[in-house]
Image (cartoon, rainbow, N blue to C red):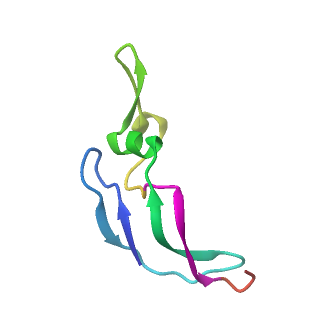
Amino acid sequence: MKAWELVENNAPLECVEIEDRQLKGSEIELEVTHCGVCQSDLHAWRGWYDLGGGKKLMLADRGITLPRALGHEIFGRVSNFGPDA
């Protein structure tokens, strides 16, 4: 399957191929057709939060690593499901 990932801060997202895996239990696979971008995604893309007064909270210092798929406001359709779903 394809995914758009943030591989480097302040850089365009990259389309990557992710190996399909066998779903188990009640897992589902969602084919994303639309995805919103929110302020949190923009902070992640930039790599830091502005704390005011010239202070920054670096996401790497908080254990947030790349690559990372952005977006949590998604819409799509179920494309596959595990045996218990």
Q: Quadrant of the N terminus?
A: bottom left
The residue at 36%/39% (across/down) is 47
Q: Where is residue 75 in the image (x, y as percent from the top left)?
A: 54, 66
Count of residue discs: 0
The residue at 43%/51% (across/down) is 37
Q: In which quarter of the image is the C terminus?
A: bottom right
Reply yes or no: does residue 74 show up in magenta: yes
The dominant secondary structure in magenta is strand
- The reply to whether residue 15 is visible in this rendering is yes
* Image quarter of residue 44: top left
Outermost residue toward the top in this view = 53
Outermost residue toward the left in this view = 11
* Image quarter of residue 61: top left
Q: Position of residue 60 (x, y in %)?
A: 40, 38
Q: Is residue 16 left or right of residue 82?
A: left
Residue 38 vs 55, above or below: the answer is below
* Nearer to the camera, 53 or 23: 53
* Image quarter of residue 19: bottom left
Q: Where is residue 4 in the image (x, y as percent from the top left)?
A: 36, 64
Residue 53 vs 24, above or below: the answer is above
Residue 49 vs 64, above or below: the answer is above
The residue at 34%/55% (across/down) is 6
The residue at 44%/41% (across/down) is 39
* Nearer to the camera, 61 or 5: 5
Residue 41 vs 84, above or below: the answer is above
Instruction: Give the magenta range.
Output: 70-81
Reply yes or no: does residue 47 show up in magenta: no
